[in-house]
Image: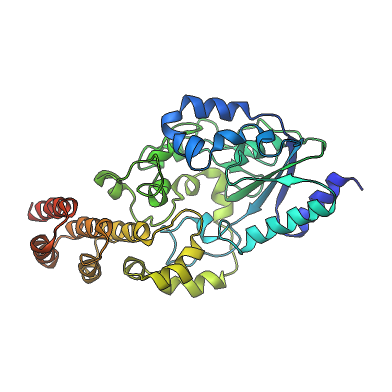
Amino acid sequence: MSLKQDIKEYALDIGFDRVGFTTAEPFDLLGQELEQRSQMYDWVGKNLLQLENSVHPQNILPSGKTVLVLLWDYLKRKIPPEFEGKVGKAYLARPYSRKRILPTMIKLMREFLQREGLETEMRPAMPDRQAAARSGVGVFGRNTFIYAPEIGSYVAVVSMVLDKELEADRCSLQDSCPTDCRKCIDACPTGALYEPYRMNPLQCISFHTYGTGNFPMVPSEIPPETREQMGTWFYGCDICQDVCPSNQKKLKQEYPPDLFLEEMAPQFSLPNLLKMDDDFYFRKVQPFFYGYIWDKKILQRNAAIVLGNMQDQSSVPHLQEAMENPEELVRRHAGWALGKIVGKKSYQILEKSLQQETSPQVIEEIKMALEKIHC
């Protein structure tokens, strides 16, 4: 049996769902897109993950000759209703959490390759989707996600550079989308999907939940109109995938329960997340959402926005408590949320907070919220 076949069989054996191979030639199209749309992507291209360095696989591994691409289907368990429409399916599967399923599979895969005498290298920023398309394990959808046959777009893509030349698989240029379909583009609340195969991440709801105010070289504020467009999405967003016709068969399947998520769901209520202390954040939340959030105030902000959009009077006492939070960011968005939950109690809380508040930014947010309630 060939080394390529050995690698494929081992990858499938430990839990990966698709395996492909492509050359280590530069991903020139990615480089062109990063250059042409630098205003949208400099934060990840040149700064945070330095994606530009991964356009040439030899920048990752100088002796690189092949890129191994692994796909993992992360939608195999039933999602508890408490998380539906609030947390993206990819994050519920914990593929980015250390010492969880996917990172463990990656570790096993690299150990196997090393035992076979191969040098391997990978980076947090790899041209994973481009490698997936070029290796033939998937094709791009108009929402920019990779679609794998019989799986859909709910896949995590892992790519590794190897120092041995292995036969490349044929790529498919077939479009996964129905002819003239625009459902993902039309459904995007913020217009982040502005044309087929083109997305502005700085307008994406998912990005706002973890990037805005958190990453360098990105906006520090979520505009008020965008907060409303976020709806109930606390972390991530699946709208453009969930409306896709190519995903409907996958979404309608019956899945066994995810016992871990069922255990976590009551603890991850929005009020709990809004009011969480450091102990709860570091023991429960940070390992769950590992990869993007380094300060709990970002998630507390998100919880306040969602509670405001839900406009449930039962949230008012929790937002009232948040108006005493030491973090200005949390107080500001709690004030905004109270302005969305119109009522006498919200008005009284905001008036009292206005008299006590010292931050000019929070004061401005409270005044706008009071005007909204008064009107």
Q: Residue at x 77, y 56 (%)?
A: 111
Quarter residue 354 falls in? bottom left
Q: Does residue 18 appear to the left or right of 277 in the view shown? A: right
- Whether residue 7 is visible: yes
Residue 363, horizontal then vertical, whole percent: 14, 54
Residue 332, horizontal then vertical, whole percent: 22, 56
Give above or below for 337 relative to 26: below
Total of numbered circles in the picture? 0
Judging depth in this view, the residue of 353 and 48 nearest the camera is 48
Q: Residue at x 58, y 61 (%)?
A: 98
Q: In the displayed orientation, state which residue is furthest to the right.
A: 1
How does the figure colour the protein chain or chains?
rainbow
Give above or below for 200 relative to 249: above
Judging depth in this view, the residue of 150 and 144 nearest the camera is 144
Give above or below for 360 relative to 64: below
Q: Does residue 193 appear to the left or right of 346 in the view shown? A: right
- Whether residue 178 is visible: no
Residue 298, horizontal then vertical, whole percent: 36, 56
Residue 201, horizontal then vertical, whole percent: 43, 39
Q: Residue at x 81, y 46 (%)?
A: 118
Quarter residue 78 falls in? bottom right
Judging depth in this view, the residue of 279 and 234 nearest the camera is 279
Q: Residue at x 69, y 55 (%)?
A: 106
